[in-house]
């Protein structure tokens, strides 16, 4: 049974050349063997369909007879598969060599597979940066603001990124002749590939400064130290990241990358966090546990008087509301105090006698 090439590409029979090209581009991205969603057989089928429908003569034959006649006089539409290059088994480049893909930019389809730069005049993006900082435990509870000094590629402060010396006039870019774009043609064993890229000299504007900025030498960006203020929100946990959009490295004519700050929290000797609550241990003497007492606890908020209730048991938790992690808008978690009763290791004769009397009474 003859294959329905229109159905394979998901386009109607009356689809325009642009619609066919767009459909092939989307499906080629999806089913290329080098991608996670790849399917070599499906990819080969797509190539076969496009090699016919993208060629005016072959498409006319296919629409009239349901098949394509090759130059040798036989019938059939499938071309010999290309056998060179990893990841392209089953892909037919013969149609490309015969002119069937005329005007079609393969870089536009396979740019992300080859890891190429942005096509079609898209703005470049600077690299992301990741740095590590350490904060005190109390800062993770209440929140704080830190100033960080680090080196990165940043927008030139002298020329504000223009690359021009102060007062310099702008002239037509000599690299792209004022067009803002340059054509590149690369030859390979697969044929010639042509692409259009944004001019790296004028960054797409078509103009360049007559006199370059002496600080960045006309690049608009350069490596320098930069100090930034980082707001550390309350409740941060060890190892969490803060993302600062646009805080990464700058690139001429494009957008800056992002800055990722990994926060490390210095452990506290007495406190730890459990969600929005702070947890600590309190050692209580046996007699105070039996009779009750008042203890002074040094907290992150200062000294706190803690009432030990009469008959408290080992491991019992005393809850102090509103002394935990800051949650914002006047809300805080709680302070949880775990009672650790200290048993005496040695007793005097008199103390031992008292304990024995208590035991006789069933206490």
Image: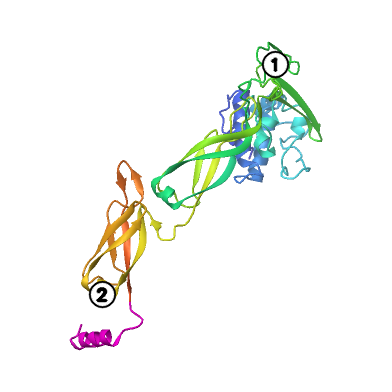
Q: Is residue 285 magenta?
A: no
The residue under the point 35% across, 47% down is 326
Q: Is residue 277 above or below residue 228?
A: below
Name the residue that disc number 2 marks.
287
User: Mark 2, mark 1: which one is toward the viewer?
Assistant: 2
Q: Is residue 355 above or below residue 333?
A: below
Q: Is residue 178 above or below residue 229?
A: above
Name the residue that disc number 1 marks.
208
Q: Position of residue 241 (x, y in %)?
A: 50, 46
The residue under the point 54% across, 42% down is 260
Q: Quadrant of residue 61?
A: top right
Q: Position of residue 180 (x, y in %)?
A: 68, 18
Residue range corresponding to the magenta coloring? 343-363
Q: Quadrant of residue 273?
A: bottom left
Q: Is residue 215 above or below residue 345?
A: above
Which of 18/11 is in front?
18
Q: In terms of secondary structure, where does tag 1 sit?
A: strand
Q: Position of residue 96 (x, y in %)?
A: 75, 31
Is any part of residue 232 visible from this angle?
A: no
Q: Is residue 31 left or right of residue 78?
A: left
């Amino acid at each position: 049974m003859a294959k329905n090439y229109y159905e394979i590409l998901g386009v109607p029979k009356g689809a325009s050349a642009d619609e066919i090209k767009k459909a092939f581009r989307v499906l080629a991205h999806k089913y290329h063997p080098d991608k996670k969603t790849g399917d070599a057989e499906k990819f080969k089928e797509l190539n076969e369909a496009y090699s016919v429908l993208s060629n005016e003569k072959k498409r006319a034959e296919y629409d009239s007879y349901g098949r394509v006649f090759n130059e040798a006089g036989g019938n059939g539409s499938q071309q010999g598969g290309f056998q060179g290059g990893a990841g392209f088994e089953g892909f037919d480049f013969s149609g490309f060599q015969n002119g069937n893909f005329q005007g079609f930019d393969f870089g536009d389809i396979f740019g992300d597979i080859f890891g190429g730069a942005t096509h079609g005049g898209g703005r470049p993006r600077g690299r992301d940066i990741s740095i590590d900082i350490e904060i005190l435990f109390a800062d993770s509870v209440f929140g704080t603001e830190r100033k960080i000094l680090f080196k990165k590629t940043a927008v030139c402060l002298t020329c504000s990124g223009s690359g021009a010396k102060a007062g310099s006039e702008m002239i037509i870019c000599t690299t792209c002749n004022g067009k803002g774009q340059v054509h590149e043609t690369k030859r390979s064993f697969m044929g010639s590939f042509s692409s259009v890229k944004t001019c790296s000299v004028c960054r797409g504007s078509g103009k360049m400064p007559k006199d370059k900025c002496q600080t960045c030498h006309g690049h608009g960006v350069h490596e320098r130290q930069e100090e930034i203020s980082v707001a550390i929100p309350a409740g941060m946990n060890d190892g969490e990241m803060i993302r600062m959009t646009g805080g990464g490295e700058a690139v001429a004519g494009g957008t800056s990358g992002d800055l990722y700050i990994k926060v490390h929290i210095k452990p506290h000797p007495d406190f730890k966090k459990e969600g929005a609550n702070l947890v600590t241990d309190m050692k209580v003497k046996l007699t105070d546990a039996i009779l009750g007492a008042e203890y002074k606890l040094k907290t992150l908020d200062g000294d706190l008087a803690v009432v030990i209730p009469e008959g408290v048991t080992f491991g019992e938790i005393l809850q102090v509301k509103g002394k935990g992690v800051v949650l914002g808008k006047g809300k805080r978690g709680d302070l949880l105090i775990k009672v650790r009763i200290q048993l005496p290791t040695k007793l005097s004769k008199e103390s031992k006698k008292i304990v024995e009397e208590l035991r006789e009474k069933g206490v």
